[in-house]
Amino acid sequence: MSHVEKAISATAVVGAELGSARLSVRFGKNARVSSEDGQGGGGAEGAPPEQLALIRESVRKAEVPRAKPRTWRGAALAKELPVARVLVDKGVLHLDRYFDYAVPEELDADAQPGVRVRVRFGAGRHRVRDGRREGGGLIDGFLVERLAESDYSGPLAALAQVVSPERVLSEELLGLARAVADRYAGSLADVLQLAVPPRSARAEQRPSPEPLPPPSAPEAGSWARYEQGAAFVAALASGGAPRAVWNALPGPEWSDELARAVAATLASGRGALVVLPDGRAVARVDAALTALLGEGRHAVLTADAGPEKRYREWLAVRRGAVRAVVGTRAAMFAPVQDLGLVAIWDDGDDSHSELHAPQPHAREVLLLRAAQDKCAFLLGSWSCTVEAAQLVESGWARPVVAGREQVRAAAPLVRTVGDGDLARDEAARAARLPTLAWQAVREGLRHGPVLVQVPRRGYVPRMACANCRAPARCRHCAGPLEGQEPGAALRCGWCGRDEAAWHCPECGGFRLRAQVVGARRTAEELGRAFPAVPVRTSGREHVLDTVPGTPALVVSTPGAEPVAEGGYAAALLLDGWAMLGRPDLRAGEDALRRWIAAAALVRPQGVGGAKGAGGTVVVVAEPTLRPVQALVRWDPVGHAVRELAERAELGFPPVSRMAAVSGSAEAVAEFLRTAELPREAELLGPVPVADTAVGRPRRVGAPPAGEHWERMLVRVPPGSGAALAAALKTAQAARMARGSGSGSGGGGAGDAVVRVRIDPPDIG
DNA sequence: AGCACGCCGACT
DNA sequence: GTCGGCGTGCTC
């Protein structure tokens, strides 16, 4: 034994007897020196520390059946509740459980449930040196619970550090994170990474503002336009927990209405949370809340604030200094105290889907929150998703809708131009634009700005009936049929079966067409057709927030439409085929949602007395199609209800639940062989997953460049979703055994990487 | 996933 | 004897 070791060993023994005064020595440099010092230990004088430890262990074991922390050989540990249950911050599923650590006395005060800690966590058997266990590196974690005893039979390592005494992880947030992890077959650590922002010491240092007393309850305002609107707000104000799916009338009032729902909840003494799809929507509700309640009552949580500011706002919420939150999807986990209302606006917008594992959707997270906290729930949209319709159909939520006369008063006039009109219309051929559309634009420009909605680039062409445009679907599982190139064999995008003899079940047609649209060029030509009028564009590159109420052509891609002062005089929706042609279950719903989002910015048809002053919308799409009819009638709820009925009939989500499993063919097959799926589970596939193109950034869920992946879909009936997620999670955790790399050929022994995605969005 | 332990074969 | 191949299993 070296001098250094002797010294340290002695210090440790003394420290153990004297208590905490010496503990810090062990965390110092000296301890590290000893650990690097070869195979020390077996000295002559006295028993080495680890033997002492073992002796005491065995003595205690005889006395107490359950383990107490022993690592420190009885050294100074917290006197009360000396065991800390820790969630180790690693997203891997087989570490998705708690680990117990001993709490040193000096960390006792700070080591409270909810704090961030650092612990030694490593592999293999640990060296026991100097009475202290080593191995593994320091990793972050959350202290979840303090206990008197551990149910772990081995010796416990000690907490290395309490990162800060701030108790960031409340019991409610932990419960929510666990529910989300279970729902999405993900790990708790992954969800917590989404739920708790990274620490900023400076933000923690700063005191949060003093909380304000509850405001008085607001007037119902424009909620009075809805049949159940005023009652809903009143229920919030009186401390109730109503659950509503709110089909908002077109126009700009929605943000004020959301603000009033928040204010009513605050008035009841509870907190409120609103999740919005993008920064522009957040800014509107932020402004509405400020107008209604003044500054200081709500926090804004968005991704584009810097990390320090973000954490500061988050802390103000966590500390209860601020009771209301508006933000984008990351705010869905905001730790609002005494939560009274969760609200989401426009749940059909795909930015509500989290990009990071396990990719939870804000609507689903808020549903879990509403159930867990027994609070009010409000899902609002100009449009209506099938999920929203299902909440009403199942009786879980009540509809908040306006009567037909209110809808007529608020909505623009909608007219359609179909393929037939296009073909017949000579002027249209020349201008690539139907007369009706041309007239609507010209007339609109006399009264104000005109919105032209054009498709985004990059949609996937899909096969449809050349005659009636109905999407071509597989006769076995009703998945979308895809043709590699025109004339080539058709194959189902879900189950991979070839379809040799397709015919259209709608009209009996047997010819197919791939859908292609040249609307962008049409819009450009439209601009040229009105040379005296300014043309502004809004799209992914530059998104305009607002445009003045003066005549102009405003060309925009879906989702980027600026709000026009006083509303648009007219809108031209040119992306009909592109939207309806997407190989997606949601194609119809999505098209309708985007049309409605644009049309809701147009003046009501009845505005003003003057002829032509009312707003007009022209949609270039076949008028017999269901989403087009729903737009004309302004009936997104009816559309969603019908879609829902159809999905139930065909076994589509959200009536059934689906999971996608992708990876190499062998990995996927092996995974599904070992997974103990629910009896009712139905396997569809496999189908190839699109390879990552060379030079292209790898998309989420796409295979690494050069690898060929396959995807299987697992479908379960209603009620089996939780069982499916649990089975997939278990199988994923057990997936340590590597793929059968036994000797076949060269390298690349299949590392059995498999991706599991609950509610895959691109189902076809 | 890391990463240490350990059980065998070749080497100073 | 001892170094080091990678196969196996654990992480409080």
Image (tube, coloured by chain):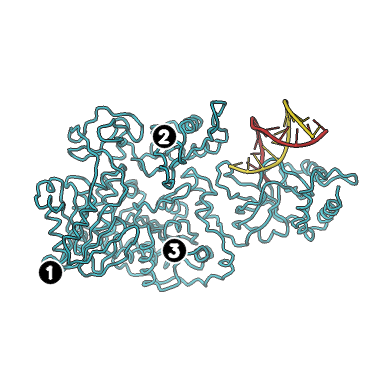
Chain colours: A cyan, B yellow, C red
For the residues marked 2 and 3, what is the alpha-carbon distance in whole angstroms? 39 Å
x and y percentages locating residue A437 in the rendered image? 15, 56
Looking at the image, which residue is at 45% across and 54% down? A374
**Tag 1: amino acid:** Gly
Q: Is residue A756 left or right of residue A27?
A: left
Label 1: how many Cα within 10 Å (few below 14, some 14–19, many 20+) = few
**Tag 2: amino acid:** Met
x and y percentages locating residue A243 in the rendered image? 37, 55
Report which quarter residue A603 is drawn in: bottom left
Is label 2 or label 3 in front? 2
For the residues marked 1 and 3, what is the alpha-carbon distance in whole angstroms? 42 Å
Of callouts 1 and 3, the N-terminal one: 3
Q: Secondary structure at mark 3?
A: strand
Q: Label 1 belongs to which residue?
A: A609
Q: Which chain's residue wears label 3?
A: A
Residue A481 visible in the shown view: no
Q: Which chain's residue wears label 2?
A: A
Q: Label 3 belongs to which residue?
A: A325
* Residue found farthest to the bottom: A294
